[in-house]
Structure formats: C-alpha cells, structure tokens
Amino acid sequence: MHVHQVGEEPSGVVDGPAAYLDHAATTPMRPEAVEAMLPFFGDTFGNPSGAHGPSRTARRALDAARGELADVLGCEAGEVVFTSGGTEADNLAILGTVAGRPGTVLVSAVEHRAVLAPARAVHAYLVPVNRHGVVETGALAALAAAARSLGSPVTLVSVMLVNSETGVVQPVEALPAVLEADAPGALLHCDAVQALPWLDVASLAAGCDLVSVSAHKFGGPKGAGALVVRGRAASVVRPVLRGGPQEAELRPGTQNVAGAVAMATAARITAAERAATVRRVTMLRDRLADGLVEATGALEPAPRALRVAGSCHLRFPGVVAEELLLLADAQGVAASTGSACASGAREPSHVLTAMGWSGAEARESVRFSLGATTTVAEVDHASRVVADAVEHLRAQ
Amino acid sequence: MSGGVDSSVAAALLHEAGHEVVGATMKLWGGPSDSGCCSAADVRDARSVADRIGVDHHVFNFTEEFSAAVVAPYVADHAAGRTPNPCVECNRHLKFSALLDRADRLGFDAIATGHHARVEHSGGRWSLRRGADVAKDQSYVLSVLTAAELARVLLPVGDLTKAEVRSLAASRGLVTAAKPDSQDVCFVAARSSAPGGGGGRAAFLGSRIALHPGRVVDATSGDELGSVEAVELVTIGQRRGLPGGATARRYVVGVDVAERSVLVGEPDLLLCDEVTLGSRTWIGDELPVGTACMVQASAHGRPVPASLTATGVRFGERARRVAPGQLVACYRGDEVVGSGVAC
C-alpha cells in the first residue's frame, strides 16, 4: 500500500482529489452571500447611523438583514444585535448579563471557549455532561437548588445547542422546565453557533432569552455574528464595549453592513434548504462513518442519533490524531481535532475530557465535519485516504 | 524549529541543499513560561521563518510526553536533593525519541535540529563530534544519543560559528537573525523583577513540592552557620546564597534533604577521585574499562582526563565532585563516546 508522505506536495497545493471536511471550523461562503455583500464594497458605502441619503441606503440594507435573520431565528427584528461573530455574541451574553444582574452563573462543561472563558471570568460553575456529552439536566437542577439555598440564586445559564466537537445536540428545549423550580428568574443563553445548518434554531431555542450565531458557520463571511436579546433579557444585558448607541445601545461601533447582509442571505438560504441538506448530508456522513468504522475499527463517541447530520467524530485506537491529520492533509483531506492553542498546536479536548475520556483517548480522536457543499467524491476520497493512513500508522 | 536562529538556519540550509523540508515546532509545555521553546511568540517566529524559506510548518503537541518524561523527573530529582538537567532529558526522551519516532511514522528520512555539534558517518560508523564553534558547542547535551539515532539526525549548523549562523540568517531575511539565545529552563518562567512578582525555579518547584528550610553546617567544624530557605534548591559546588558572607571561600559540599542540612567547606573538600554514573549510554560499542577519555560535567565545563571504570569514570587527577543528577559526557578528542548521569 502506498501512503502519500507529508511534504510530497508543496504547501496547500494538492494534485487530484481533495476533501474539505472541517465545516465545523468554517464553511465556504455561499455564492449568494458573496454576491449580496459586494455592493457594500462599492457604491453603497454609507454609515447606517447617519441621516443623509447614503446613510439611509445603508440603514435600509441593515434593517432588511436584521429582519431576514430575525425570521430565521424566530425573533423580532429589534431583538437582533449584530456583533463581530460568535465569540463577541457569547461574551456579550455572559458578561453583559452579569454586569446587569450579578449572581450565580452556570454553564455546561462542554461549551465552546467563547463561553467558557467569559464564564470563568465571572466565576461560573460548570454543569457536567454524561458519557455521550449530553448535559445532565438533573445536575443542572441540583446546582440551581444549591445556589438558591445558599442565597445566591442562578441568574444566568448557558448551554450550547450543538457541541462544536462532537456534534451532540443538547436538551436546550427542556431547560426552562428544569430551571422552573429553583431558578425561574435565570436568563437562558444558548450558543447556537454550530446549530443553524442542521436544526430549527427558532423553535429549539424559543425558550432562550439570549441566542448566539456566527455567519461563517453557515456560508456567510467571517467577522459577522449576532446575539438575540429578547424579552426580560432586554432590560438586564449591559454593553461590554463602550461607545456609541448602535445596536440598541448594546454593541457600539459602526455596523459591518456587508457582513450583516451576507449573513442574513446565507441564513435565509440555509434555512430554506435545511431539510434537504440534512437528508443528503446524513447519508454522506453515514457513508463516511460506516466506511471508516468498517475499515479501521474506529469508535464513535456518541450515538449518531444524538448528533447533527454534519458530525462525523471518530476515535482511531492506537493512532495519534495529530499524525493522522498530517498524512490526510498531504492527500488533500482537511479535518481537525476541534481544538487548538495559541501556538496552533492541537490540544486535548476539554469536551472529551468532560465526557470522561483520558488524555490518550482524546488524542486519538478526529473531527470530520461535513457541510452543505460536501460531495460523495469528497467523502469517498477521505474515506480511502484516512483508512490507508490509519493502516500505515498502526503498522509502524 | 524552536523559533531560534540556529534551527531557522538549519532549515534554510537543508532546503537550499534540495532536501524536502517540513518545519516542526514542538509544543512542550502548557503552563506559563516566557522563555525557551514553548511560547506562542516563538512559534510565530518559527512559522515566519518557514514561510520565508518556503517550507510547510507544523506545531506538534508533545506536552503530555514532556510533562511525564522531563518535568516530573525534574521535580522529583529536586525533591530528592539532586540537580537534574532537563534539557538533556528533553533531548533523550522528546526531540530524539518522540519526535524522531513521529518523523518515521510520517515518512521522513531524518530530523534536523540547530544544535552546534557534528554528526559524521565514516567506515560504517556513526559519530558525534563537537561543533565548529567551540564557545557554542552543544555536543554535551546530545551525548545521550545512540548511533541508531544519529543515523537519522542532521545538524546543519554544526560546521558553522554562531556569527556565521547569524550572518546567514540575516542575508536570508529571517526574523530570528538577531534573536538572543534562549537561556535557562524553558518551562520555568523567568523570575519577575517586580516585588512579589513570582516566577523562577523556587516558585515553580514550590508550587509542586514542599520546600524545606535547611541548616547550613561547616563540614569540618560541625558548627551551624545559618540556614537556607530551601534545601531542595541547593546544589553541590554552589557558592552563592550561603550564609556567613564572603569571609571564606565556602562551597556546598553535601546536601541531605532528609536531614534538611547543607554541608559547606573549603573547595578542596569538593575534590574526588571518581564518579558513579547511571543511565549510561554509548554512541557506538561499549568501551572497555580502563579506556582513557576526557570527561565534561556541564554544558560548557572544562573537560578533564579520566578513565572508564565498571561503574563510571575515574579522574586522572582529583577533580571537582559532580552534583548527583548532572550529566557526564565522555570524549575522545572531539568525539563523544557516551555519557551517564552522576549518582
């Protein structure tokens, strides 16, 4: 068997087939979204905060985008706060809520670092997950009861809709009932950044006061995101950045009009095509996962039924994922482990650790994530390359 | 590629010689540190050099291996009153073991580093020799390698002086050309100059093991002269930081962690005839007892004549004692024959 070696191809150039299977990291932009943003790099350059003609044109575009995104997210246009992305939306949700109403904060142990880091800064408590990575709602209720009995009731709970590494869907819909007894006043934040391509966020996060999304995870541009701030949250959340009165005085700074418009366009198309995309990608994901499980004995961290269609998370016992990914990359297969530090080194995942995995097990796991543009050819190429690489690495 | 000038130039020279080069930076330490091979700034420098040369660059996470094979023994050695050399253990267990194995699995023929030493192959025999720049020679920290490892190691800057390396880096526009050499132990953050700023070896060890004050006793008279803050941080041969001022030339001649005592005395009390070595390695075949060689007990220490014994080396003339935990490298001429760790 020939395994193509690292370094045989110059950087980033691959002759022959390639497979982009890192959609959870970022997605290629939808052509319609690219098209939608172009006018704002040309004649439509106005600042939406002004009063004159060019400003009004920009304002109209921004308002239209706000309405379009609100439709997808199941909220009012006035409840959409545009941000620079998912991380800023999460920070605004956590730090902005605590600034307005101090108290006990609970977040799941498997949140993205965009939630975990601000949560740590406000001394949040972590809610454990079960071995499949699903938040333990019983533990959440118990923590809420304990906080209440200690005289520091829970004021904010943050649970993601879809885990960024494992693709596991969290029981966000159930949370209002879970918190009803001991934290009825707590605001509920949902980081829905990974969810939009796969789930009906509007309905699943309907009970949440705060919802974060990020454009580049569903065919929009990087540098654009939004936080839904609705109902009782509107009177609690305070801005994190200080400046002008833009975005309902919650997020100062001239808006990224092009980004907001492209995000709304991508969101609309993603939502319209979602059912078909989920059907097609589920088949592709099963083809990839079944193929690799069969060929390599790979293990799946959680049943597929618990995970979104695009998630193919596999552990290859006896293989260091870092090495597998390098060999795969040399053959044009782009995937990841889901977590990297400042230096770019791959890190053992806090998500897998929270699920009870050892560091060694975590280092054997790879996140393949499929998206709306994934093809059968990509999946088959990846399946072949990865199976060969696993066999090669195990033979050493 | 540590992000330093030597490995930068090593990569450039191999690439120019037509090798298929891929840069690799080892992330070794997850904790706070501001020196050495692990910081994001160093990775940025390494990546920038790789881009400039035109080769791929990867960061490999070896933090678990490093923690287990280098940091844990470093802490345990100090707790036992020994004086470990973590850079040597990193070469032994990480760079020329874990990384070399990974390179094998990924299909590379060899790894190259920026160490100042020379690998030679003649008459079917692999040898390790001192670097051309005597002041920068690093053959000592590589003396734990074996011929099988040397066969897969390239040291492209070993024939160059440091000045030549810097000039080659500058002429290629590498950002590391004027970067200062790394100092100290890479995983121990430098001591902050601010009051109560933390950092340093004492803070690093103090957060991992209990440090105990020790009595300082005159080895000849038995008089108690004062105390040191942490007996675990005292090293045989140490002169600084002892109580009693500069009235006499006093050195640490014994450390007993269990008794929490430090013996001090005149420098001639440090002299000894031989040193017993553990973890002995030979680059080629094991040499017979009695073989004459020169031994060096620190990175830039003065080599002294000695002969091999069954358990270590015997000095030609009484020589200064080697602190337990320190590496002793044996040379014949400028060729390394093997090494061992002082017991």
Image (spheres, rainbow, N blue to C red):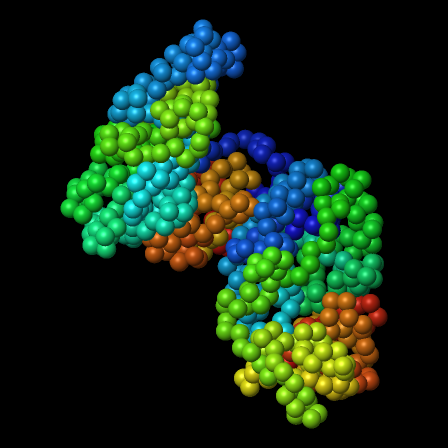
Extreme residue in the top direction:
A53
Name the foreground residue: A200 vs B209: B209
Q: Is residue B74 above or below residue B312?
A: above
Q: Note whether residue B101 is visible.
A: no
Question: Where does the image place residue A108, in percent across and percent down from the top left?
Answer: 31, 47
Q: Is residue B65 above or below residue B342?
A: above
* Residue at the image point whose x is 69% and y is 53% from the top: B112
Q: Is residue B303 above or below residue A107?
A: below
Question: Where does the image place residue B168, in percent across and percent down from the top left?
Answer: 80, 44
Name the foreground residue: A129 vs A100: A100
In the displayed structure image, the side of residue A166 where residue A31 appears, left or right: right
In the displayed structure image, the side of residue B131 where residue B66 appears, left or right: left
* Residue at the image point whose x is 32% and y is 18% from the top: A67
Name the foreground residue: A16 vs B43: B43
In the displayed structure image, the side of residue A108 where residue B191 appears, left or right: right
* Residue at the image point whose x is 81% and y is 72% from the top: B302
Q: Note whether residue A44 is visible.
A: yes
Q: Quadrant of residue B222?
A: bottom right
Question: Where does the image place residue A389, in percent across and percent down from the top left?
Answer: 50, 46
* Residue at the image point whose x is 26% and y is 38% from the top: A187
Q: How many marks?
A: 0
Extreme residue in the left direction:
A181
Question: Where does the image place residue A167, in percent across and percent down from the top left?
Answer: 34, 40
